[in-house]
Image (cartoon, rainbow, N blue to C red):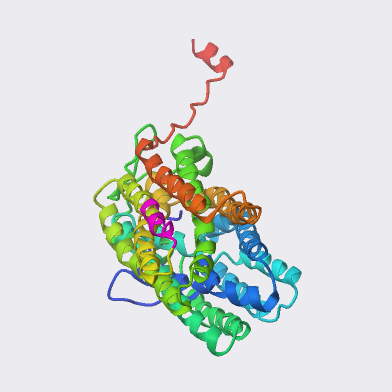
Amino acid sequence: MSMNVATKKPPIPTPFFYGWVIVAVSFMGNWITAPLNPVVFSIFIVSLRDDLGVSLFMLSLCISLRQISAGVSAPVIGHLVDRFGSRWLGVACSLWAGVCLCMLSYISNPNWMYVIFFISGFSGFGVFGGGQIVTGVPPANWFVRKRGRAVSIATMGGGLGTASWSFISQFLIMSIGWRETWFLYGIMIPGLLVPLYALLMRRNPEDAGLFPDGASTPPAEVKAGMAGAPRFGASETNFTLKQAMRTSTLWLMTIAFMLHTFATNPILFLRVPFWTDAGVSPYWISLAVAADPFVVMLFTLIYGFIAERYPLKFITLNGGIFRALSMLPLMVVSPFAGWAFAHNIAWGVGSAGMGTGQNLAIPAYFGRRAQGAIRGFTAPIMIGAGAASTPLITMLIGWGVLTDRMVFIVAAGLMFTAGSLFLVMRTPVLPAAPVASEPREAATQRA
């Protein structure tokens, strides 16, 4: 990371630290691309099922294929973000996402639907399970001491997008149809994001002649052999990907979020058809789904400030507990909209806790410099778990092996376990560089 900052300047002059512009661009990136995420896609499920005559299992494969391609591309995207930043990568990814959505509006054959969903995963946008590298890395690069609030504010864009586009999607589908809705989104995403990323996004503060948090000096480096602090302050520990892979912390973190993602995706996919079949009005379902991200936004901001003062492990534990509690209303089979709201509120609190942990854990424990590469390494594992879970669960339900109630019980246990794993996670110690042994001939001559 270059420290030659004397002759560099931010793209536009601002009366405040330019990092907040980066936060704003990341916020907009998360908001505008929310139509790509599984929650908003769930609003389209009933229309696709009825119009194309496809089963829930076939539709679940669409999300899984998209996640598989997102997982495959995550290491490449992570490396490119570390080396070049998100500026031109964000431009390319938003164009790719827009083209894919426009193509989806023309599908009539399920096979083409699979192909388009698969290639849409390479956009890097709208992916759950640690795949938000293009929007997640920049704010974490620009802040250390205030990283909790900065990353949380940027993340809130996804919550706002999920809430707004879920409701808007339901309205547009009923008004103009699902094909026209997707085409409209395909024009909107690159139309708004391309100028934002091209003009305003930068890789890190050093590239703009600044230091993290607007400080006058760079953050102090934690020396080798010393434990870095997973709280945010004036210092940071910077691991390489290879160094991080040698720590138990990274593997426990990956397992925790893998379990979390494995349990999450089937619930996102099943809950709307579950409530529809139970007799809940589509209008109330869309409002309940929209309530979830508003709760996520509020608690993401709260957890972001808490993360700057208290250990991150307690936030993820809280997230796991609330995610587990959110399964209880789903176990009450009743055509009552209140249960849908109860689920989404508890789900939103838990999502904020686990989401905050997911966005902050890698830069908090392993530093800024290789966070793209580290995220790129962990993302395929997390995303792969989510990609496998939905087809597996829907297939087992179709065979009569599982019931909806059994799925909800298992998901509750996995989510609680995911949050609890952080309690046994240790702060990693940066390994000292190996000392080169002295050549024997030189030692003999000096003796």
Residue 159 picture location, percent across and down: 40, 69
Is residue 329 a member of the stretch shown in magenta?
A: yes
Where 174 sits versus 438, above or below?
below
- For image coordinates 61% across by 48% down, the residue present is 401
Q: Is residue 301 visible?
A: yes
> Would residue 36 appear left or right of 15 to someone viewing this image?
right
Q: Nearer the viewer, residue 215 or 151?
A: 151
> Where does the image place residue 88, in percent across and percent down from the top left?
56, 70
x 75%, y 68%: residue? 111
**Is residue 441 rendered magenta in the image?**
no
Q: Nearer the viewer, residue 75 or 255?
A: 255
- The quarter of the picture where residue 72 lies is bottom right
Q: Is 274 positioned to the left or the right of 361 in the image?
A: right
Residue drawn 35% across the image and 49% down it: 321
Residue 82, can we see it? Answer: no
Q: 390 or 328, which lies in front?
A: 328
Of residue 441 and residue 177, the one placed in the foreground of this image is: 177
Q: In the figure, 87 relative to 327: above or below?
A: below
Highlighted magenta segment, given as a residue range: 324-333
| Residue 227 coordinates in the image, percent (x, y) | 34, 36
Position of 366 compared to 74: left or right?
left
In this rendering, the count of numbered labels is: 0
Image coordinates for residue 136, horizontal then vertical, percent: 45, 61
32, above or below 230, in the image: below
